[in-house]
Image: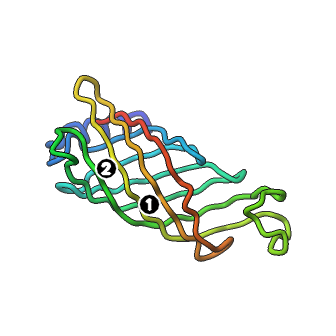
Amino acid sequence: MKKLFLVFMIGLLTAVTVNAQDYNTGIGVRGGLSNGLTVKHFIDGNNAIEGILSTRWKGFNVTGLYEIHNQAFNTPRLNWYYGFGGHIGFWDGYKDHPWFDKADQIDGSYTVIGIDGILGLEYNIEAIPFNISLDWKPGFNIIGYTGFWGDELALSVRFIF
């Protein structure tokens, strides 16, 4: 049943007409200080939603983003984008890491909820169905280990269809 559902969804996604972007959906990997999986889907015109599942601090984060894409430098298939969203994460931290305040740590485990921004540049390769993006995703944890996290620079490679 799961295989039938997967085949149906792939067929449905490939049958959808192409919008203003060079692709409708991209699925791939994201690498930086946190590594993980990324799925981006255009909901209309230049507006996309992106989901990121990443690992860091001996745990994981789930991030959802709304993004607006525009052509960059009048170059076909080169786009810049910006957006916002939120995250929830569960991590154990590093008890001896300099970013963690030892006075706040009881067991080093945290559940965090926060907001995110994103600013990036992506290129959709014409010859093969892949794109490459480089982005900066700063975040601010509101609940849990609170504070600003500005070190999320990442490179993503996605299969696009």
Q: CA distance from mark 1 to mark 2?
A: 12 Å
Is residue 135 visible to the viewer in this orientation of the structure?
Answer: yes
Is residue 27 left or right of 141 when viewed as pictured?
left
**Can you tell which mark lies on residue 41?**
2
Q: What residue appears at the point 21 percent right and 38 percent down from the top-left corner?
A: 77
The answer to whether residue 36 is above or below residue 43 is above
Report x, y in % for residue 124: 27, 36
Q: What residue appears at the point 23 percent right and 37 percent down from the top-left corner?
A: 14
* Amino acid under disc 1: Gly
Q: Secondary structure at mark 1?
A: strand
Which image quarter is the N terminus in? top left
Report x, y in % for residue 76: 17, 38
Crowdedness near tag 1: few (<14), some (14–19) or many (≥20) residues, C-alpha within 10 Å: many
Report x, y in % for residue 108: 80, 63
Instruction: Give the quarter of the image for residue 10.
Output: top left
Sequence-earlier tag: 1 or 2 = 2
> Do the numbered discs 1 and 2 sit on residues whose CB atoms are within 8 Å?
no
Q: What residue appears at the point 21 percent right and 53 percent down from the top-left corner?
A: 70
**Can you tell which mark lies on residue 64?**
1
The answer to whether residue 28 is above or below residue 128 is below
**Can you tell which mark lies on residue 150?**
none
Q: Secondary structure at mark 2?
A: strand
Is residue 148 left or right of 91 when viewed as pictured?
left
Q: What residue appears at the point 34 percent right and 57 percent down from the top-left corner?
A: 49
Instruction: Give the quarter of the image for residue 85.
Output: bottom left
In terms of depth relative to the viewer, which is nearer, 125 or 8?
125
* Amino acid under disc 2: His
Report x, y in % for residue 103: 84, 74
